[in-house]
Amino acid sequence: MPIQLVVFDWAGTIIDFGSCAPVHAFHKAFATKGIAVTMAETRRPMGLHKKDHIREMLKAMGRPWTEAEVEELYQIVTPMQLAGARECARLIPGVPETARLLRERGLKIGTTTGYFHAALAVCLSAAKEQGFEPDAAVCADDVPQGRPAPWMMFRVMEKLNVYPPKAVVKVGDTPIDMAEARSAGTWALGVVDSSNEMGLTEGEFAALAPAERERRRAAVRDVLLDAGADGTIDTLAELPEAIEAFEAMS
């Protein structure tokens, strides 16, 4: 079955190498309430709707919490997320070139994200200025429930009139992205180098010694595969080859 649609995540996949903007925003927001969390604890729920992200962080702390506390933290983190999205709006290397190759093959391009409308608008505007514009973009605010529910994927498929699910590849950088793809019945492809799971800026990643880089890549691949990925790619340059492999398996 030919692949007709590729649906990308945003932060850590096509923009914001290392998914820095949302992580730093959550870390700062919790700090304003005197709640100490590590960067690893902050990254763990990445990809969820932002309120769900807060809930998961609070649950992991093992202490009582209320929905009022969730709402308060959400109101604090929202402007921080918006500022971070603006500051970390650089496309990950290779995105425009990969998108061009996909379109030359006749594929459609969509996106899903745990971001809210205003942050998605920032990403869309910045990406367009840098040469990338999807055919459809859906955020967690557009559907009854965010990831891992399949509704954002289905909304993109509906908008672009693409079915069945096995004609679609979801490309993301977190276990939640892989779960979203599995829920929707699409192919799940994990991105390694720029991912939230790698958790490094482009400069930090480039500075790694070759052996350490490969060690970290192997660890991230294992996380994404354990989460249900059908395969992984280090960078988006490998995406066309991965699509051909999925088509051969259909």
Image (tube, rainbow, N blue to C red):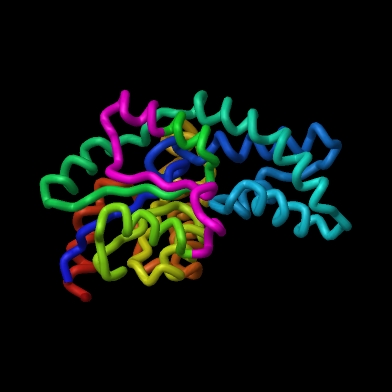
Residue drawn at 58 percent across, 38 percent down: 22
Residue drawn at 32 percent across, 35 percent down: 93
x then y, percent, for residue 116: 54, 41
Residue extending farthest to the bottom is: 250
**In which quadrant is the C terminus drawn?**
bottom left
Q: Nearer the viewer, residue 67 or 93?
A: 67
Q: Which of 114 and 92 is in front in this view?
A: 114
Q: Nearer the viewer, residue 38 or 248?
A: 248
Q: Is residue 7 above or below residue 96?
A: below
**In which quadrant is the N terminus drawn?**
bottom left
In this picture, which residue range is highlighted in magenta? 124-149
Residue drawn at 44 percent across, 54 percent down: 217
x then y, percent, for residue 147: 53, 59
Position of residue 175 in the picture relative to residue 108 (left or right): right
Q: In this view, does 164 lie above or below 38?
A: below
Residue drawn at 22 percent across, 60 percent down: 243
Position of residue 42 in the picture relative to residue 116 (left or right): right
Query: Any magenta on residue 152?
Result: no
